[in-house]
Image (cartoon, rainbow, N blue to C red):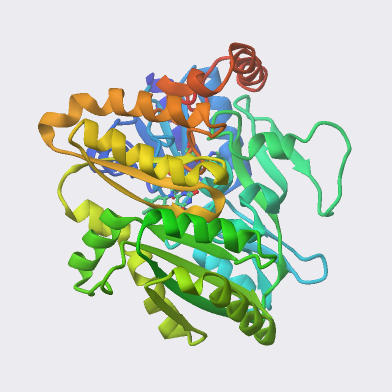
Amino acid sequence: MNERAIKELADLLGPKRFHREEEYLQSYGYDATNTLYLPDAVLLPETTEEVSAIASIATRHAIPLTPRGAGTGQSGGSLPVNRGLLISFTKMDKVLEISPADSLARVQPGVITEEFQRAVERENLFYPPDPASLKNSTLGGNVAENAGGPRCLKYGVTKNYVLGLTAVLPSGEILRTGSRTLKNVVGYDLTSLLVGSEGTLALITEITLKLIPLPESRGVIRLGFPSVKEAVEATVQILGSGVLPSAMEFLDQSALTEVSRFLNIPVPEGTTSLLILELDGRKEAIHADMETLLSLVGPRTTEREFSFDPSQMESLWTMRRQISPTITNLGLHKVNEDIVVPRSRLSEAVEWINGLAKEHDVKVVLFGHIGDGNIHTNFLLRPEQLPLTETLLTALFTKVVSWGGVLSGEHGVGIAKRPYLSLQLSQPEIELMRGVKRVWDPQNLLNPGKIF
Ligand SMILES: Cc1cc2nc3c(=O)[nH]c(=O)nc-3n(C[C@H](O)[C@H](O)[C@H](O)COP(=O)(O)OP(=O)(O)OC[C@H]3O[C@@H](n4cnc5c(N)ncnc54)[C@H](O)[C@@H]3O)c2cc1C
């Protein structure tokens, strides 16, 4: 960074929001992948106009720009791999409007996901996308990654709720996409293009989100099975029954063993896999649906528990919610993938992945959004096994794609999956995507080094 650019940025933001001190560079130079890339400066803008001014200064001086929400990303998307400016959106954290009449809200990108959900629930409205990181992640990061979560089985992912965006192009130009209406088919859908673009096309400074009515009540069922195969078969049976749970999660035997040891909760005799289902809607309907499900898959189970009480429901969720900290606590190197397979391949996929891990003498823990076919595959490696990473991932992704599945259902490409992109996308697709990137960001200054 040259002295002119430093002075222009310091004059724009002042000493409290323009930082070059080592502790700031360190704090904003990592994400949930636990990798560190130091930026040259950390910027904390508060308005769209400030973001626009930053972008035009960066473009004039050819300085790379990396947007960052809360840094919970699992694919390295917010890491400033080419140094330059790190724009943190944490100070743009206002809910600007909640409109029950239009069933929408307008927010700044730094609003924390869970805080937004609580705010709209006070108006009896509902924003379903619920990444497991929702206590920390930002809505801007959710939009940039098109985040999903357990409830996406019934309600869809983030993109299904984004009606419009305000975004700043690398040139500094301010763009408004979409509308306040539920329907809009005028021109190309630039809003959808920006959702999931991982901060490579524009800087998102305002989001208009669709809201739906808050369901009257919830119920949770936890089912134990004697094998993952039985749990997978029950999943397919449930999803074919006409009852659509709002969430449907699973833990395999390794996940269950580790989490029960970590939390000191005994696993019922004969249980080697868990399904946790949530239902929502009118209370009578949930009761009826629970009865249907229990009579359908009950005979396969080793354990059945259900509740409508908020604290008991939370305790039925505990094992699923605690699986990430449990794995981290094992002290092994975690290679955390979020592949998706067609549901008809789930059983085969679980068996195949376990076989791959066994072949290489590697520990693997499987859990996740089984209803979506989204299996969080965690290879846990000892230090001397680190060189195996590429072999494991190439084999995994190649197999997943051969089943008609995808490399990532939630975490995005970032830098983590960049080497494997061509296993899923054809060369013409990659070239078209590169072409889109060139149109939006001709100097390749916005989040360079990501996706491609
Ligand atoms: C324990 C844990 C559980 C998780 N569970 C889930 C899950 O269930 N589902 C799921 O989908 N993900 C999950 N994630 C991944 C992560 O939380 C999501 O990708 C989340 O959306 C990232 O939000 P963030 O605010 O932390 O963004 P960051 O990590 O800071 O950034 C993510 C990407 O968004 C870009 N970005 C951020 N803000 C903007 C902006 N304003 N304009 C343009 N680009 C921007 C960044 O450049 C980067 O490419 C999990 C992560 C952890 C650590």
Q: Does residue 111 appear to the left or right of 254 in the view shown?
A: right
Residue placed at 81% from the left, 48% from the top?
Answer: 179
Report if residue 452 is visible in the image: no
In the image, taking residue 326 as reference, residue 394 lies left or right, namely right
Q: Is residue 208 above or below residue 340?
A: below
- Residue 430 lies left or right of residue 352; in this view the side is right
391 sits left or right of 311 in the view: left
Residue 257 rendering spot, x and y as whole percentages: 23, 61
Residue closer to the observer: 22 or 236: 236
Q: Quadrant of residue 417?
A: top left
Residue under the point 52% across and 47% down: 373
Query: Is residue 354 positioned above or below 234 on the image?
Result: above
Instruction: Examine the rendering and report whether any part of residue 151 can be seen.
Output: yes
Instruction: Point out residue 258 in the picture as x, y percentages from the top left corner.
Output: 22, 59
- The residue depicted at 37 percent of the width and 72 percent of the height is 302
In the displayed orientation, state which residue is furthest to the left.
384
| The N terminus sits in image quarter | top left
Where's residue 166, x and y in %?
69, 43
Residue beneath the point at 20% across and 37% down: 362
Q: Quadrant of residue 443?
A: top right
